[in-house]
Image (tube, rainbow, N blue to C red):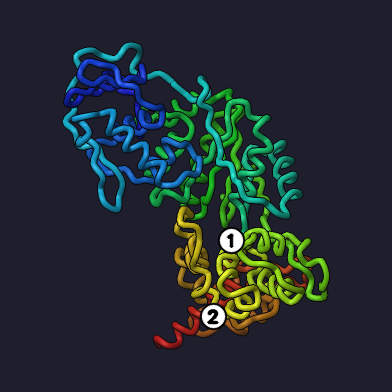
Amino acid sequence: MVTLPDSDYEFGKTVVSAHRRELVHGGKRVEIGNRAFDLLLLLLEERGVAVSKNRIMEAVWRGRIVGENALEAQISSLRRALSEDRKAIVTVAGRGYQFVGQLREASEPAPGPAFTCTSPYRDSRKPRIPQYTSRWFGREADKMAIAGRLETSRLVTLVGAGGVGKTRLAVEAASQLAHRFPDGVCIVQVGSITTPDELPSLIASALIPYVPDGATQLRFQCIEGKHILILLDNCEHLLGPISELSETLLEATSTVRLLATSREALRVRNESVVPVSPLELPPDEAIDDVERYPSVALLLDRVGDAFVMSDRRAMMAAARICKALDGVPLAIELSAECVPALGFDGVAEQLKNRFELLIHGFRTSPSRHKTLRASIDWSYEPLSQSCKTVLNALSVFDEPFTLTAAHRTVSCGEMSELKVTSSIIELVEKSLVTPVPQSNPVAYQLSNTVRAYADEKLRVGRTEQ
């Protein structure tokens, strides 16, 4: 965690003053940009430890989505500023960057108190959220719903399946609501970390650049009275720690509001859950104007000029692609990458092998979004064995099914009906099984992609037996 030190940092011919935000080398002040300076402070605070690229990007860019080239440029700038002390910053292959220099006590203590709450809300560096450049489809009503929920609830969680567009929706809603939060809107990329121990530091880096180690309550005091919206993105793999921290933060402050995205609700007191559904699909009988449906419009937009829409048959093939992929934006965008090579008809035909086909995600995307399989892996791998068994068995249903039908299909000597029921409840909570709206008795269904994934697992399991 980045802190304000009691004294300056000094190594080699370099002196770094965090309080004055000043770098002196060989007795002369060196001009250095804000991001390079923040990067240096982070590496100094974490000295002796390799700091991951994701951690650096969260601390230095505060949630803004940037490529690795931007980080490498700041590392180069920092090394130039350090001159012959540049070797104090080393690259750790496959892990990140590390400060390895020998620190010593500076000749003069830094002025001011041991801790100063230098929150970004007290200067011009208000936290910002990423700005997307691609077009957005079919979510205006959802965005308005989020705005309404945040009026009455301090914690709103967007819940939906992987790749359904929760992050984009949250960012677009937060951007529209920025005027309500004069002290800043920030994003915390929870998906960039793997252990709960990294969470306080991650949130601190998004909120306040320099806070004392372990001073969670003091950190919250720094933002008390501030009108801030914190976007907690991709919470599903750290639900327990995120839930505890969210509840503590809301209890310790009165004006901070949280907007979370997750494949499962946080289950925190006074949480308002907003389900996020796939994009609207054209009905089976639709022949004309299928491009006006958000799912098809997204596909055509992402294909762009790379492939010329030749005839109505191609348009109908585009609609088939979207239906086969359940209207899920991530899957549709992955399919768009294949259209220039295969055409719409070719992609529609090859979706029977969707997990081998849809593997060309953006290079800068999180690993869970680079392939269709990775997106489902992210939800499937943490499941209990009983949930995996039930989900795999449910893949035999290509139509909605009742709980009774699920019991007949799944229950066996090793799993009671009660265990099947509790597993289905958990799978619904994790956005892997979906209740059919207004069905009576309640019916359930699997998306085409989840069914294909579970069927593959079921077949592999039978082969291994």
Q: Is residue 169 left or right of residue 93?
A: right
**Element carrying mark 2:** helix
Front label number (1 vs 2):
1
In the figure, 296 relative to 237: above or below? Answer: below
Residue 144, image x, y percentages: 75, 44
Q: Is residue 299 left or right of residue 311?
A: left
Classify 282 as above or below 255.
below
Horizontal and vertical percent for residue 443? 71, 73
Q: Earlier in the sequence, mark 1 or mark 2?
A: 1
Regarding residue 109, the answer to whether it shows in the image is yes
In this rendered view, identify the residue nearer to me: 158 or 18: 18
- Using the rendered view, name the quadrant where residue 442 is placed: bottom right
Left or right position of 283 against 418? right
Q: Residue at x 36, y 16 (%)?
A: 20
Can residue 426 be seen in the rendering of this structure? no
Task: Indicate which disc residue 455 carries.
Answer: 2
Picture quarter with the C terminus: bottom left
- Assess disc 1: are there few (<14), some (14-19) or many (≥20) residues with their C-alpha within 10 Å of its C-alpha: many
Q: Is residue 237 left or right of residue 110?
A: right
Question: What residue lies at 66% left-to-right and 72% top-to-bottom?
Answer: 321
Local packing at callout 2 (Cα closer than 10 Å; few below 14, some 14-19, many 20+) is some
Which residue corresponds to the image point at 31% horizontal and 43% vertical from the top-left?
Answer: 51
Q: Label 1 amino acid? A: Leu
Instruction: Give residue 205's position: percent from left, percent from top.
Output: 43, 35
Disc sitting over residue 165 in the figure: none
Distance of mark 1 from mark 2, alpha carbons?
Answer: 21 Å
Amino acid bearing label 2: Asp
Residue 104 versus residue 375 in the image, above or below: above
Question: Tag on residue 330?
Answer: 1
Point 58% across, 46% down: residue: 260
Q: Nearer the viewer, residue 76 or 204?
A: 76
